[in-house]
Amino acid sequence: MTADPSPPVRLPEPPTRPTLTREYLAAAALALIDAHGLRKFSMRKLGTAVGFDPMAVYRHYDDQEDLFDGVAETLFTEVNVDTLPWDGPWRELAQNYCLRLRDTLLRHPQAVPLFATRPVRSPASIDTGVKMLTKLSDAGIPPAQGLRIIRCLREFTIGHTLAIAVTKLGADQRSRKPEPGSPDYNLLAEAADATTLDDHFETGLTAILSGFEQSARMR
């Protein structure tokens, strides 16, 4: 039998009181997913990892899907939206939010598919949405259009991070790129060598924000 090559899991500090909490379990689940991936995760493994009877997890979460909602909320909390430039222009706020969301998700590539496939409905997330719509409304953008803008930005950001995460996680299986001077080294290969996997994110984000800003001025 060969040893498990997976890296050791660095769990968060346990709660000071002798009982588990929803927040701690979600953070511990995220740590396990970071280390081993979604496919190898289970509620039983989580219970064992935190040193409790696996059934103890079910006292805080109904099932694995409920727990995954908690993990998504943990990722959103890591974005730390309270420190965004809420006093600045709406475009600056939106840009900073998207950049910070991207950076947060790319620190947890194994968990990006989880975040991408479920809405985050925590009180903090809902409050952030209301504050963003208020910011856009103050700039003359009606709430319905503001929600369209927020959705577009969120989908662009998550879609980008999902593509990058999948690419990075499958790096070992990708075919070798042609070398300069080889017969297969064409213009596409040359352009790929002059770029990185995610250096187009800000280009796309700027284009989207500029389009929405111009549309808002024309209203």
Image (cartoon, grey):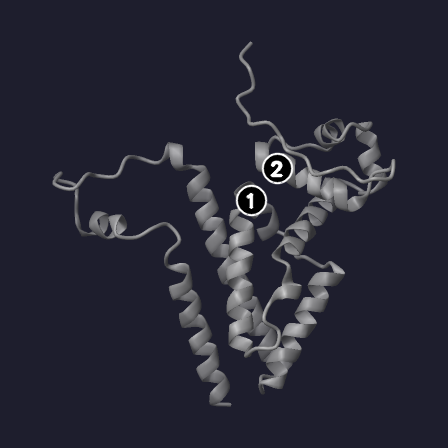
Q: Amino acid at mark 2?
A: Ile
Sequence-first tag of 2 and 1:
2
Relative vertical location of residue 90 with respect to residue 14 in this rendering, above or below: below
Image x and y of residue 92, in percent: 52, 73
Q: In this rendering, does residue 8 appear at all?
A: yes
**In this view, which residue lies farthest toward the top?**
1
Crowdedness of circle 2 by 10 Å Cα count: few (<14), some, many (20+)?
A: many
* Foreground residue among 80 and 194: 80
- Of the residues shown, which amino acid type is indicated by label 1? His
Q: Helix or strand or loop: what does disc 2 sit on?
A: helix
Disc 2: which residue? 33
Which residue is located at x 49 percent, y 52 percent? 161
Counting other residues with Cα less than 10 Å from the Cα at mark 1, is it few (<14), some (14-19), or many (20 or more)?
some
| Residue on which the image places disc 1 | 108
Name which residue lies at 60% across and 46% down: 114
Q: Where's residue 156, x and y in %?
A: 49, 61
Indicate left or right for 209 with 93 as reference: left
Q: Residue at x 25, y 52 (%)?
A: 194
Q: Quadrant location of residue 21?
A: top right
Quarter the N terminus occupies? top right
Q: Which residue is situated farthest in the bottom direction here?
A: 219
Q: Is residue 204 above or below residue 193?
A: below
Residue 37 in view of the camera: no
Compared to residue 187, the image places residue 35 above or below, namely: above
